[in-house]
Amino acid sequence: MKCLTPEHSLKGECRFLSANMYARSIFGEDALANISLEEHEEGPVTGHIRIRSRTQGIALSLGDKITMNQKKK
């Protein structure tokens, strides 16, 4: 996925990140992911990822890939 959020918006010291990501499948389907993460003083990083697309298949596929990567760590 490609980050649509300008790089200067991602710099700096804070405990919260919000970014937009974009991808296009080999079949020409578009997908947009909205990512919001928060780092707590004590504990894990928490957040939400929302995936949107015109077709349900690509959103489910991207969601499965994200879930698999989270379980590895």
Image (cartoon, grey):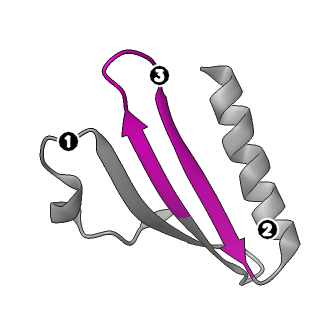
Residue at 57% over, 65% down:
33
**Residue identified by numbered label 2:** 58
Q: Which amino acid does the dot numbered 2 rest on?
A: Ile
Q: Disc 1 versus disc 2: distance between alpha carbons?
A: 32 Å
**Whole-percent x, y for residue 67 in the image:** 72, 39
Q: Earlier in the sequence, mark 1 or mark 2?
A: 1
Residue at 36% over, 27% down:
40
**Whole-percent x, y for residue 27 in the image:** 78, 80
**Residue identified by numbered label 3:** 44
Which numbered disc, 1 or 2, marks the residue closer to the eye? 1
* Left or right, residue 64 beside residue 14: right
**Residue 8 seen from this side:** yes
Does residue 31 lie above or below 49 as drawn? below
Q: Which amino acid does the dot numbered 1 rest on?
A: Cys
Q: Which residues are magenta?
A: 34-53
Q: Disc 2 versus disc 3: distance between alpha carbons?
A: 28 Å
Q: Residue 45: say if magenta.
A: yes
Does residue 44 lie above or below 11 as drawn? above
Q: Which amino acid does the dot numbered 3 rest on?
A: Pro
Does residue 57 lie above or below 70 as drawn? below
- CB of mark 2 within 8 Å of CB of mark 3? no
Mostly what secondary structure, the magenta segment? strand
Does residue 3 lie above or below 45 as drawn? below
Q: Which mark is residue 43?
A: none
* Left or right, residue 67 beside residue 61: left
CA neighbours of label 1 inside 10 A, class few (<14), some (14 to 19), many (20+): few
Mark 2 residue element: helix
Residue at 87% over, 68% down:
57
**Residue identified by numbered label 1:** 14
